[in-house]
Amino acid sequence: MTRHYVLDFDGTLFDTEMFWKWIVERFTREGLEREVVRDLGEQLFPLKYTVEKHARGLGLVEETVRSIVEEFDEVTRSTSPSLVYPDVLSFLNGRPSTILTHGEEAFQKFKIASAGLDGRIGGVRIAGPEYRKVKHLEEMLAMSETPHLFVDDNPKELLRVHEAGLPVELVRMRREGQRHAKDDHELDDQVWRVIRSLNELE
């Protein structure tokens, strides 16, 4: 059966934790406490995270902010291709698919392009706190009669779709080492399947 695959990016297609480790280490080199850096990052993630916002929120001077942003842009360009999970490219080959990610639009699109995925995916949608993933899925369903399957590593996103009653097959990705993977959810393998690789969807 033909399905349209709607795929989260961070932690599902892409090992974002490697970037997070770089960010924490870079800010601690400025003399900041690791926990302070982590706590502010956690506050920014549900909004529209950027390294620039993080640096300014930590009170760094403008010259340091610009330097860190430039360094991170270069790290993103150079390392992103290696952070795409090994099962991703073969899975995307020929399958109707859309990336549905959350965050600041320019930053997310920069990561996706740097990873080399923008030419391999049917489209990219960027959700935020004012227009969540569930609303994007509602739009997509209204424009197509093809069954949709939604894969996300964050059970909160899956729960919103479930509670909205959307006719979407739900799958939770639990990649080892990713921030949401350590937490069990009562609806795992009840309302949504749990997988650790896209190969399990073959």
Image (spheres, grey):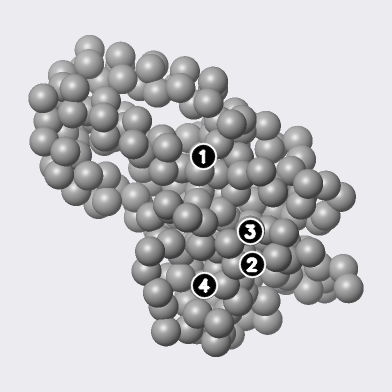
Q: Marks 4 and 2: CB-CB under 8 Å? A: yes
Report the residue at 50% width, 48% height from top: 10
Residue 53 % position (x, y): 28, 35
State which quarter of the image contains the C terminus. bottom right
- Decide which of tag 4 and tag 2 comes sooner along the chain: 2
For this view, does 21 lie left or right of residue 192? left
* Label at residue 150: 2
Residue 137 % position (x, y): 62, 67
Using a 10 Å C-alpha cutoff, classify the residue at mark 1 as few (fewer than 14 neighbours), some (14 to 19) or many (20 or more): many
- Decide which of tag 3 and tag 4 comes sooner along the chain: 4
Report the residue at 60% width, 48% height from top: 13
Mark-to-mark CA distance, 3 and 4: 17 Å
- Decide which of tag 2 and tag 3 comes sooner along the chain: 2
Q: Secondary structure at mark 1?
A: helix
Residue 129 % position (x, y): 40, 58
The residue at which mark 1 appears reads as: 108
Q: Secondary structure at mark 4?
A: helix
Query: Could one spot residue 30 in this view of the protein?
Result: yes
Nearer to us of marks 3 and 1 is: 3
For this view, does 26 lie left or right of residue 73? left
Q: Amino acid at mark 4?
A: Leu
Using a 10 Å C-alpha cutoff, classify the residue at mark 3 as few (fewer than 14 neighbours), some (14 to 19) or many (20 or more): some
Mark-to-mark CA distance, 2 and 1: 19 Å
Name the foreground residue: 87 vs 54: 87
Mark-to-mark CA distance, 4 and 2: 8 Å
Nearer to us of marks 3 and 4 is: 3
Mark-to-mark CA distance, 3 and 1: 22 Å
The residue at which mark 4 appears reads as: 158
Residue 12 placement: quadrant: bottom right
The number of discs equals: 4
* Label at residue 197: 3
